[in-house]
Amino acid sequence: RDSAFETKDLLDELGLRSFIKVTGGKGLHLHIPIEPRYPYETVKEFSHAIARLMVKKWPDKYTAVMSKQKRAGKIFVDYLRNGYGATAIAAYSLRSREEASVALPISWKELKTLDGSNVFDLEAAERFLKNRKNPWADYFDTRQHIGVLDEQGLKAVSQIETV
């Protein structure tokens, strides 16, 4: 939870609004809707730069290295979710697990009170969603530019690490 808020703070500093989803598994996914104006490689490298920045700011807490042996005791900032062929659980999907937990879009405020990313089985998800506004209601209307990339292109990626 703290990691998600730290990531959100970094994105806020860059002027990017983010949305959060519990995965129904161990993690959280942050979504940043952007205009489709950037090449794939640029967006992937931007994501990698954010991961490297987190590792630089908090080296005892985060890693951007996928190898399980090299990330023991650290949180893996998985920028690779932005790769071709990478998979991610869709919102409102049931996980194919014994407890059949649900991946749900949530608000940043709701994240503060959750006990985990896999706390919603189907019945709990239904209860949670009743009488609640959709925290992602304007997700598809949110079309952002990545300011540092617009101003300086890919060379700005290295500057992200100094934010």
Image: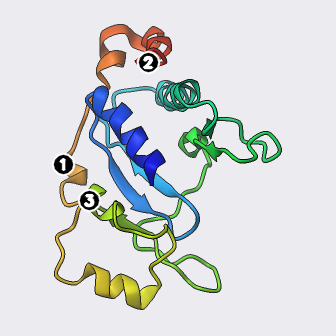
Q: Is residue 29 left or right of residue 58?
A: left
How far apart are labels 3 and 1 at the CA level?
Answer: 21 Å
Earlier-in-chain disc, 3 versus 2: 3
Snapshot quadrant of residue 97: bottom right
Q: Tag 1, which secondary structure?
A: helix
Q: Identify whether 145 is placed above or below 94.
A: above
Q: Tell me the kind of residue under disc 2.
A: Ile
Q: Residue at 45% across / 26% down in the picture?
A: 39
Please tell me whether mark 2 or mark 1 is closer to you in this view: 2
Q: Residue at 49% across / 29% down in the picture?
A: 50
Total marks shown come to 3
The residue carrying mark 3 is: 109
| Closer to us: 102 or 63 | 63
Q: Residue at 56% across / 76% down in the picture?
A: 95
Q: Tag 3, which secondary structure?
A: helix
x, y percent for residue 152:
36, 8
Please tell me whether mark 3 or mark 2 is closer to you in this view: 3
The residue carrying mark 2 is: 160
Q: Tell me the kind of residue under disc 1.
A: Asp
Tag of residue 141: 1
How far apart are labels 2 and 1 at the CA level?
Answer: 26 Å
Please tell me whether mark 3 or mark 1 is closer to you in this view: 3
| Quadrant for the N terminus in the image | bottom left
How far apart are labels 3 and 2 at the CA level?
Answer: 27 Å
Q: How did the renderer colour the structure? A: rainbow
Earlier-in-chain disc, 2 versus 1: 1
x, y percent for residue 51:
54, 32
Q: Identify whether 67 is placed above or below 134.
A: above
Earlier-in-chain disc, 3 versus 1: 3
| Quadrant for the C terminus in the image | top left
Q: Tell me the kind of residue under disc 3.
A: Lys
x, y percent for residue 66:
72, 41
